[in-house]
Every structure is written in structure tokens, then in C-alpha cells.
């Protein structure tokens, strides 16, 4: 075992995360938290498997849900077979079956998709994704048509170590275990020659070919392995929700995993983990507060693409470098100074969006001069007052952000210049 | 015979509509290397704008104003969004247009609701153009053909016969040289993007009432347009034209064919085993996947597309 890879710090960090994951539901005994954590665990595996393509091999896929969905459907059918005939498998081992199914799908479909890289790959993956999604509605026998396929995870000889996987907490334990194993395996893969070659194929395919590697083969292998982990994630979804619909493998799911991975940061191994946690929490918390959540999500994504294309992980990494260089302290006042106008701007924008939603989506807007409840405030939306107020706040936020933001940017650039100057 | 002629006419109408979308996409792609994921969203915007204008002042002003509005939105997107994303490379650009498609759908949900809107064919164009073998051919389909062909002739003339067209063509291949000669290449890019999206908008104006104007229309057409571009060959306008007509015809013919796969194999003397789910599927049921199957076949046997010049 390479001690540089599995050093003490890393073992401590990973062990700490595992302990935290197990401790959380024991400390806070809330059903909501456990189901949120289950969702996060599944999405972490899915996003990491996606980043094997996008981040590590440079393959932008718009059809990754195919492998996830196939893993989920195969798992559900296996579960039902075990339930009917009793099989040698137990529920706890089904993610392996789902993973193999995803991998097999990767072997078949990846042969076509990975012939090309770049933009062509993106389009082909989209086409294949649509193809499979359309097939899902054509074969109701396997995909269950509109209603999907459902099952019951408490089946078979189960009872491994006395667990039936019936209660949500036990299911959570299973998810954590599988997610941890998959994460370790995916991290280990980045350290193998294949993982390194994938990076080379991403950065400079021509040179990789000159060195003597078949870039198409590297892409194909990475896609197969990525299909394996996506299948495991899909399998966990099937076991967790006990129902799989054709929604699992459509373009929307592929889009969500792309957004998650990108927002988290594709340049770092832990980036997709941050993205999966953040988006799952946003989805459930903000999604519970407002109908406009998808709009906020889209705006947030565009903001990240334009402002921080390296994702949250890259922002963290830069702060860490500043900290190590002793420059972080100098930036703190600037961060605090810019936070206020940004908050004002956000408040104005959110006000405008929420009022538009209330007005246009017709949530209880009565005729005449009746007040509408927007964000717990009684507002008269058919009078210009609230609109002018929101516009004013937005404009003030915009002006202040530009003014203070300019100074923050100058400080930021000088800090970065010092940082890079030190290095060279 | 009747079936063939009618389906062919329908297929060409649909194919020409597809070409209005794919030509803009192809132009934008070959000029800027951007695969505009939001292209079909501009198609949807065209339909919704035209609907909104038609409720105020009628269909005909909308036919002119809606594509121009869409083009203006497209130019603004290029100027303030894509140009910024361009600095971070192609993946960032692609993701930007992807996010944009997502956002446009949400905004359409917000303004016009989640169900389809009642965007109608104008009364002047509501009727039968001619009757062929007892099947009526509506005026509106003839009108769609007329607009598409007129637009394409105009586009062709613009690109090959005018000064700005020549500069655009030059900027396609040698942007640095064109810039050195004193032309504002970023502005040309903005114009091409605006023009391409305006074409998509026009397709939306005439397609929205022929089919259905709903928030899902962008996603439904978007992936088909990508198939067209891949099948025709990335960056090839001629290829996009052939592929648009081909896919238009495949879709209309397959929707109307009710024979099953077993029957198809019976025609060539092969009897399939009874009872399997695949064998019982009819061509109509297969219709949604046929374009994708064609794309996969093209990618395996001719990876650069029907008329693509290069393998990218």
C-alpha cells in the first residue's frame, strides 16, 4: 500500500466522515434528517460516478441517468424475484447486482458513445439517453410503464446480522456502507495507472496517443467503470424508495447529476460530494419553502458557470492556498465588506421573483385591492408600492455590489498575485 | 400511393421546419464551436412570443416581431453570457447554454403556466389548399412550406451574394485574419448568434400553432435537432438539410405505419417467434426511437455524418 496515498491525515479524514455519517442519525433522532441523509448518500455516489467522466476523463455526458436507471430497474426486478422464489442473494448485496447491470449497460452503450470525445460525445450521450428513455415507455413489461416498478426490500433470507433493512435507519446504514465502499473504490481508481491515463486523455489526447495509449479504449474503460458506480447508486435508490419509475433514467435526472457535479467542482475528487450534499439540501429545504426553487437553482448554476467555473471546491482550494500563504487574514475584511451588498442584492432579487411568482402563478391573488401573502408579508401586488420597493433594493444592491465588489476584486487579484509570486 | 404522397408532403413540411432549427444551430456551431443547447428553447420562446402578440394584435405582426424579439434575446445572451463563458472553454459554454435551457423553461412556466396555451392558426390560413386522393391538404402546411423555403432562399442569398455574408463565411474559417482586416469579429459572432436564434424563433412562430405550444416543446424538439445535426455531419449546412428532410420523412412515415415488426419480417420471408414483446411492437410504437437508432447507425458506420467534412 502506497503510504503517500493512504497517509494518516487522509485515513483520519475518511474515518471521521464515516463516523460522522453513522453518528448523525443516532444523535438527532429525526425521520426527516434520516431520509435527507439517505438521499445525500445516494447522490454522492451518483455524482462521483459522473465526475469519473466529466472531471477525470473530460467527457461531458448528458445521458448518465441511463446507467443509474438500469441499475435501479434491475435491482427492483431482482428484489421481486427474491421475494417470490427466494434466491441466494440478500437485499444487502443487491447494489452489487445493480452495479453489474450498470456496468453491462456501459459495455454495450459505451462502445458507441466513446468512439468520440468532446462535443460529439456530448451529443451522442444525449441521443443514447433519449433512446433509452423512449424505450422505457415502449417496454412496460420491464420498465413498468407510467407507474414504474415497485417492490419490498424486506424479503428473502435477509436478516444479515439481524438486520431486515425494513426501518429507514437500517436502510441508511446500508446506504452509508455502500456509499463509503464506492467512494473509497472511486478514489483508489484515481490513483491507478488507468485513472492517471484518463487525466492524460482529458488534457491532451494527441500526446496520450503518441505515448502509445489508445484514447478510445481509455474512455471506454472509464465509462464502463462509471456505469458500475452509477448502477450502484441506482440500486440504492431502488432499495431506498422501493419504487422505480422511468423518471429515473430520463434527461432530467441526467441534468440534475450534471448540475450537482459541476456546482460542487469537477477539478477535485471531493467536489461532487460537496455538490451532492448542497443540491440535495437545497432541493429539500428551499424546495419546501418556495415554488420558484428551480428558477433559483438555474440562476445559481448560471452564476457558478460564469463566476466560478471550478465549482465550490475550487473556491475552497484557493482559500486554503491563501491560508497556507498567510494571506487569508488580509482578505477577511474584504469578504465581510462585500457580503452586505450581495445580501441586499439577493434580498431585492428574491423579492422580485417571489412577487412575480405570486402574481403570475396566481397563488391566491384576488380581484381588486386584496393583499397577497408573499414570504409571510401581506403585500398589495396590484399597486406599484411593493414592486418599486423591491426594484429599489435590487438597484441599490447592484450599485453597492459593483462598487464594493470592485475593491474586493482588486484586493483579491493582488492577493492572488502575491500567492503566485511566492510560488515562482 | 395516396399514403406515400401525403406522408411525403407532411414529412417535407416537418423536415423544412427542422432545417430552420438545425441551420441556425449548424451556423452557430461552425462559427463559434458552440453547441447551443438552448437552441430549441429559442424555438419555444418564438412560439410563446407569437402567441402573446397574437392575443394582442393578431398573427401577422407576430410573424415578423416574434422572431426579431427572439433574435434580440439571443444576441443579448451571446453578448452578456456566452462571451464571458467563452473564456473558460467549450465545456463552460456548453454548460452555460444547458443552464439557459433550464432557466428558459422555468421562466415559461412562470409566465405562461405549465399547461399548453391556445395558440391558433389564423382564420385566413385555416382551410384546405387542395384535395389529393380524398385527403385534404391544409393551407397552413402550404404556408409553412412557403415560409421555410422563402427563409432558406433568403439565407442562402445572404450568405453567398452579399458582402456581410462573405465576411461571415470568412470569419467561419479564419476569424483572426478577418479581424486583422479590420472587421469586428465579436460583433459578427453576436449577429450570427442572434440570426440563428431568430431563425429558431421563426420556426417556433410557424411550428407552435401547427403542433402544440407547451413548456415541454423545447425538450421534445431539441433532442431531434441534435440528431439531425449529428446525422447530417457537424458543421455542414448541406448535411443538415438532407438530414432534416430524411428525419422529417422517417417520423411522418413511421407514425402512420401500423404494421408490426413481425409483419415486416414476414415480408422478407422470416417468421419471428410468437409472443415476444419486441416482435409485437408496431412501427408506430417504434416511431419515437427511430431517429435515435438512425443516429447510432450513422455513428457506427459513418462517424462524420452524411456530409460532414471532418471527424471532430
Image: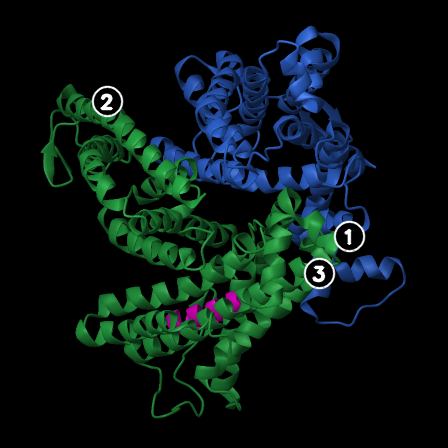
Q: Which SS type dominates the magenta stretch?
A: helix
Magenta segment boundaries in residue numbering: A229-242
How many other residues sit within 10 Å of disc 2, few (<14), some (14-19) or many (≥20)?
A: some
Q: State which quadrant residue A240 falls in.
A: bottom left
Magenta run includes residue A241? yes
Residue position marked by numbered label 1 in the rendering: B300
Provide the residue designation for mark 3. Answer: A217
Residue A399's label in the rendered image is 2
Quarter of the view holding residue A133: bottom right
Element type where label 2 sits in the image: helix
Is residue B283 visible in the rendered image? The answer is yes
Mark 3 is surrounded, within 10 Å at the Cα level, by few (under 14), some (14 to 19) or many (20 or more) other residues, namely some
Residue A205 on image: x %, y %: 68, 49
Q: Is residue B268 above or below residue B292?
A: below
Visual hue assigned to chain A: green
Q: Which is nearer the eye, A115 or A341?
A: A341
Dot 1: chain letter? B
Colour of the chain lettered B = blue
Mark 2 vs mark 1, CA separation in Å = 55 Å
Q: Secondary structure at mark 3?
A: helix
Q: Residue at x 80, y 59 (%)?
A: B263
Amino acid at each position: 500500500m502506497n503510504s503517500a496515498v493512504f497517509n494518516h491525515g487522509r485515513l483520519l479524514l475518511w474515518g471521521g466522515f464515516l463516523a460522522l455519517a453513522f453518528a448523525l442519525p443516532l444523535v438527532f433522532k429525526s425521520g426527516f434528517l434520516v431520509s435527507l441523509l439517505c438521499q445525500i448518500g445516494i447522490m454522492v455516489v451518483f455524482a462521483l460516478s459522473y465526475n469519473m467522466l466529466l472531471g477525470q476523463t473530460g467527457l461531458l455526458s448528458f445521458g448518465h441517468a441511463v446507467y443509474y436507471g438500469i441499475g435501479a430497474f434491475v435491482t427492483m426486478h431482482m428484489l421481486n424475484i427474491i421475494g417470490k422464489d427466494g434466491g441466494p442473494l440478500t437485499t444487502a448485496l443487491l447494489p452489487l447486482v445493480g452495479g453489474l447491470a450498470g456496468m453491462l449497460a456501459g459495455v454495450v452503450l459505451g462502445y458507441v458513445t466513446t468512439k468520440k470525445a468532446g462535443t460529439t460525445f456530448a451529443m451522442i450521450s444525449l441521443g443514447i439517453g433519449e433512446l433509452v428513455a423512449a424505450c422505457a415507455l415502449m417496454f412496460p413489461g420491464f420498465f413498468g410503464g407510467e407507474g414504474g416498478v415497485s417492490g419490498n426490500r424486506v424479503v428473502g433470507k435477509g436478516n444479515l446480522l439481524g438486520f431486515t433493512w425494513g426501518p429507514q435507519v437500517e436502510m441508511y446504514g446500508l446506504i452509508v456502507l455502500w456509499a463509503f465502499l464506492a467512494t473509497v473504490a472511486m478514489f483508489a481508481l484515481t490513483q491507478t495507472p488507468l485513472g492517471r491515463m484518463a487525466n492524460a486523455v482529458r488534457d491532451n489526447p494527441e500526446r496520450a496517443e503518441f505515448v502509445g495509449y489508445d484514447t478510445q479504449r481509455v474512455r471506454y474503460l472509464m465509462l464502463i467503470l462509471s456505469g458500475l458506480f452509477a448502477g450502484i447508486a441506482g440500486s440504492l435508490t431502488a432499495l431506498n424508495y422501493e419504487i422505480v419509475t422511468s423518471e429515473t433514467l430520463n434527461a432530467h435526472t441526467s441534468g440534475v447529476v450534471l448540475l450537482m457535479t459541476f456546482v460542487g467542482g469537477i477539478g477535485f475528487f471531493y467536489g461532487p460530494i460537496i455538490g451532492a450534499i448542497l443540491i440535495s439540501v437545497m432541493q429539500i429545504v428551499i424546495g419546501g419553502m418556495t415554488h420558484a426553487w428551480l428558477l433559483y437553482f438555474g440562476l445559481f448554476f448560471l452564476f457558478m458557470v460564469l463566476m466560478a467555473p471550478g465549482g465550490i471546491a475550487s473556491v475552497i482550494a484557493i482559500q486554503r492556498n491563501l491560508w497556507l500563504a498567510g494571506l487569508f487574514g488580509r482578505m477577511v475584511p474584504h469578504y465581510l465588506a462585500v457580503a452586505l451588498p450581495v445580501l441586499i442584492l439577493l434580498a431585492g432579487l428574491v423579492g422580485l421573483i417571489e412577487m412575480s411568482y405570486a402574481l403570475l402563478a396566481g397563488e391566491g391573488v384576488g380581484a381588486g385591492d386584496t393583499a397577497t401573502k408573499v414570504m409571510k408579508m401581506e403585500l398589495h401586488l396590484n399597486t406599484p408600492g411593493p414592486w418599486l420597493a423591491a426594484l429599489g433594493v435590487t438597484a441599490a444592491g447592484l450599485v453597492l455590489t459593483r462598487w464594493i465588489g470592485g475593491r474586493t476584486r482588486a484586493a483579491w487579484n493582488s492577493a492572488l498575485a502575491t500567492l503566485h509570486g511566492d510560488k515562482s | 400511393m395516396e399514403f406515400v404522397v401525403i406522408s411525403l408532403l407532411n414529412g417535407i413540411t416537418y423536415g423544412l421546419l427542422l432545417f430552420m432549427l438545425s441551420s441556425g444551430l449548424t451556423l452557430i456551431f461552425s462559427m463559434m464551436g458552440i453547441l447551443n443547447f438552448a437552441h430549441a428553447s429559442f424555438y419555444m420562446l418564438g412560439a410563446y412570443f407569437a402567441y402573446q402578440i397574437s392575443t394582442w394584435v393578431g398573427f401577422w405582426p407576430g410573424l415578423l416581431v416574434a422572431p426579431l424579439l427572439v433574435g434580440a434575446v439571443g444576441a443579448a445572451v451571446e453578448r452578456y453570457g456566452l462571451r464571458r463563458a467563452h473564456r473558460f472553454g467549450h465545456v463552460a459554454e456548453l454548460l452555460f447554454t444547458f443552464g439557459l435551457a433550464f432557466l428558459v423553461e422555468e421562466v415559461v412556466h412562470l409566465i405562461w403556466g405549465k399547461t399548453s396555451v391556445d395558440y391558433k392558426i389564423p382564420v385566413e390560413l385555416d382551410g384546405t389548399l387542395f384535395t389529393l386522393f380524398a385527403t385534404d391538404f391544409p393551407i397552413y402546411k402550404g404556408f409553412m412550406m412557403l415560409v421555410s423555403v422563402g427563409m432558406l432562399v433568403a439565407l442562402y442569398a445572404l450568405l453567398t451574394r452579399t458582402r456581410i455574408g462573405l465576411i461571415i463565411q470568412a470569419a467561419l474559417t479564419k476569424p483572426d485574419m478577418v479581424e486583422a482586416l479590420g472587421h469586428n469579429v465579436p460583433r459578427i459572432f453576436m449577429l450570427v448568434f442572434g440570426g440563428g436564434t431568430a431563425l429558431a424563433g421563426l420556426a417556433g412562430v410557424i411550428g407552435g400553432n401547427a403542433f402544440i405550444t407547451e413548456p415541454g416543446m423545447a425538450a421534445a424538439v431539441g433532442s431531434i435537432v441534435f440528431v439531425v445535426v449529428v446525422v447530417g455531419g457537424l458543421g455542414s449546412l448541406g448535411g443538415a438539410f438532407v438530414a432534416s428532410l430524411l428525419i422529417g420523412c422517417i417520423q411522418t412515415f413511421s407514425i402512420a405505419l401500423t404494421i408490426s415488426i413481425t409483419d415486416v419480417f414476414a415480408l422478407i420471408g422470416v417468421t419471428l417467434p410468437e409472443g415476444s414483446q419486441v416482435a409485437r411492437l408496431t412501427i408506430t410504437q417504434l416511431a419515437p426511437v427511430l431517429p435515435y437508432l438512425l443516429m447510432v447507425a450513422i455513428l457506427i458506420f459513418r462517424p462524420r455524418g452524411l456530409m460532414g467534412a471532418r471527424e471532430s
